[in-house]
Image (tube, rainbow, N blue to C red):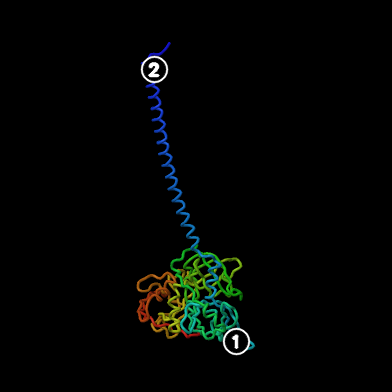
Amino acid sequence: MKKSNSERALLIIAVILYTILIAITVTLTIKTFDKFFNNDVNENKEVIIKYESKQNDKVKEINDEYDLADIVENIDKSIVSIKSESIEKGFFGDYSVESSGTGIIYSETDNYYYIVTNNHVIDNSTNITIKLFDNEADIFVDLVGADKNTDIAVLKLKKDDIVNKDDNSEIKPITIGSSSNIRVGDTAIAIGNAYGYSNTVTKGIVSALNRNVDTRLNILSLIQTDAAINEGNSGGPLIDKYGNLIGINTIKIVDTTVEGIGFAIPIDSVKPLIEDIIQYNKVKRPYIGIIFSKYTNIIYNNEPLPDGGIIAEIIENSPAEKNGLQMYDVITSIDNISMKDPSDIIRYIFSKSIGDTINIKVYRPNEEDYFDIELELEEININN
């Protein structure tokens, strides 16, 4: 049966409407999917960008730590090997003793290089020679001044005495860093004349800060490191990951049960002292003239002595002697500030100026007393 014209028209309209509906549905679906997909991609891109940014920061941090070989090559011209000779008295007469260490070219003038090392490397020496980076010749140097309290000494090398004149164009003072900003875990590199082998390099970390080590004359607050510091390293540099000087190697604990404990003097604590020695041939610091006992937690009459510093020795004609301090007095406070141990006392006195008056409280058996003491200039012979 044939369909009428009206039925055909209705069928055509239905097909057209159906087609339009399908087209609209597909279009909406595509747009929705596209919107969703693009948002997802954008979010992922943002995450990736943020991640790459973090990675770049890390890469930058790593790249900022120069290659160790480049550091050593750059600093090699700032380090010298030191030999010193002293005369000792023995049963069969005088005999010569040699010791070795390391020095750091700290600064220069038109005519001289100033070299910093440990006092114990050159103490009581009659002759001191150095070798530069080329290791070619022994060159005699002069002692400018030294400080036993901090184990620091400064030597002077005359530029005209350098055998190979081309060395002058390559020698350069070390870059001075800061020990105040270092943290436990930071990279630490020790360079020195270990066992006579010049410019031996060891790498480790800063193991601890403010380690108090008793030298009897002073309580040194040192940097502890696991970078190997061996015989001959004394006076050499402890540098950071950028090659900047942060400490002066000074002590290694020698014990078969202990491994990897070395110490360095923080550069910030001795920088002013080095400048004093270069300018005045000595350290200009206040003192009262006492040496503390290394013993603590002492019991007297079944009672522990109070916190502070026990006086073991008083220097003749010192402010302490002039003002009546005695051996075995315990200094418990200064200017109404409690002193926990000798290091507190030493730091406080060193923070004052020559001519200042301090009020010291001391404990004696069954009594306490107060003393006003004017700080004087510490006079030390150039050869200690």
Give the SS element for disc 1. strand
Q: Does residue 188 lie above or below 293 as drawn? A: above
Which part of the image, by quadrant, shows the N terminus?
top left
Residue 221 location in percent, x, y? 47, 71
Which residue bears the numbered disc 1? 89
Query: Can residue 226 be seen from the camera position used here?
Result: no
Would you say the residues marked 1 and 2 are in contact, meaning their CB atoms lie under 8 Å apart?
Answer: no
Query: Can residue 137 be seen from the camera position used here?
Result: yes
Q: Nearer the viewer, residue 101 or 59?
A: 59
Q: Does residue 86 lie above or below 340 as drawn? A: below
CA separation in Å, label 1 and label 2: 134 Å
Quarter of the image holding residue 122?
Answer: bottom right
Residue that extends furthest to the bottom in the rendered view of this protein:
93
Q: Nearer the viewer, residue 151 or 117?
A: 117
Residue that extends furthest to the right in the rendered view of this protein:
92
Which residue bears the numbered disc 2? 8
